[in-house]
Amino acid sequence: MRVLAPSIRPLAWLCLALALALGAGLATTSGAERWIGTWATAPLAEPATKENLALADATLRQIVHVSLGGDTVRLRLSNAFGAEPLALHRAHLALAAPHGGIQPGSDRAVSFGGKTAVTIPAGKSVVSDPLSFPLAPQADVAISLYFEQVPATLTAHPGARTTSYLQPGDALTATALPEAQKFERWYFINALEVFTAASDAAALAILGDSITDGRGSTTNGNNRWPDEFVRRFQAQPNARPLGVLNLGIGANCLLRDGVGESALRRLDRDVFGQNGVRWLLVYHGINDIGTGRDARKTGAPHATAADLIAGYEQLIARAHAAGLRIIGATITPYAGADFYWDAAGEAIRQETNAWIRTAGRFDAVVDFDAAVRDAIEPARLAPEFDSGDHLHLSVAGLRRLAETVDLDFFVR
């Protein structure tokens, strides 16, 4: 293991494919052609009443920013947290235009087993039929869904940092939705995949919390740090086809459930359930430390450095068992975030980061802490990288993270 500049040899190819059926699961395929994730998000449960959105008998148009391009795509929808079936009447894909519009001539109907309607059972997901859909790298795709009915508990992602649009009735093919209700959430969409014959195509899954999810980025700006990494990676001459999948959840913890299931618990679904993943980058732990502040004051149980290290060891073992290479990222500074920071927590962060850097357990390490800390007060973020709350990164800080990941790790 080398910090920031690992040297690797090619692995025997492990291809993960989702079954084209309800309850899609892992499967292996042969040959060079394969499905690779170009966009994904990590779901969590949300009551249907939370945002007072009338999703039934309405068109929901959601915008996603892809990484890898291709000519044929398929869409995965999820009812993972619903206790009742999700009845979808129709779905369409189109290239997105500003303000919830779609580009003329780009609209395509999506089918499931040859049918336009599909009912997703409680706790399951469904993958669409392959769809001819020319897609450029870093394009914005509008996913329009028309529901007959929805469960009481929705499968959602609240940290979209992208405007979604809801309009009563069937407006799937409307080129504009000027009267639509607007909000920053994704519902039921789980992944978009491209079909490729490129033998070196693969995906990087990023497991993280709000900093990865995009807190501090610009709404509709597509400047989360994984987005910035995609731009940097694809700017290389002859860059390999690489899908980058942002699986961050705001306020998510490594070890315990809270806002979403813990990283350890959701690993199988959110990472191993993605197609074509060859690398996993883990940038997690600050919420385990910060939420333990009050517990430390009273002597109540809380996450220690040993606990975090044991959690990382589990991620490493499970990633390697799945044939993945795993990159560990150090935990970034947060002094000044008075709702989270204390001296005991800082000691846990330092001990954990020292282990990440020196233990040699990860296949490679990216030192996010060193990249964004203040030169004079290293327990703090550098002012230019601080969003203002002393925990989350500014747009410049997110870009700095993307610049810190060594591109050589992703060579063949």
Image (cartoon, rainbow, N blue to C red):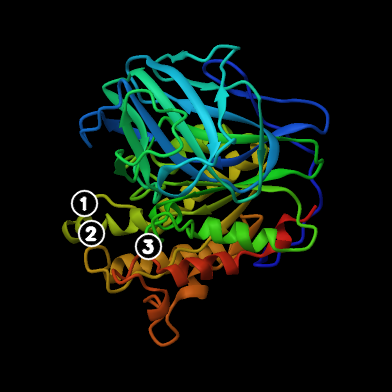
**Please, what is the three-letter code of the amino acid marked with disc 2?**
Arg
Residue on which the image places disc 1: 300
Q: Image height check: is 257 above or below 329?
A: above
Q: Residue at x 42, y 81 (%)?
A: 374
Q: Quadrant of the N terminus?
A: bottom right
Q: What is the spatial separation of the Cα atoms under label 1 and label 2, in whole angstroms?
A: 6 Å
For residue 394, side relative to residue 75 (left or right):
left
Asked if residue 15 can be seen in this view, the reply is yes
Instruction: Count every numbered label the image shows and give the total.
Output: 3
User: Dot 3 corresponds to which residue?
Assistant: 216
Q: Quadrant of residue 333?
A: bottom left
The picture places residue 127, in percent across and down from the top left corner, at: 56, 23
Earlier residue among tags 2 and 3: 3
Residue 296 is tagged as: 2
Secondary structure beneath label 1? loop
Q: Are marks 1 and 2 in contact (CB under 8 Å)?
A: yes
User: What's under tag 1, amino acid-wise?
Assistant: Ala
Disc 1 crowd, CA 10 A, few/some/many (<14, 14-19, 20+):
few
| Residue at 34% from the left image edge and 55% from the top image edge | 287
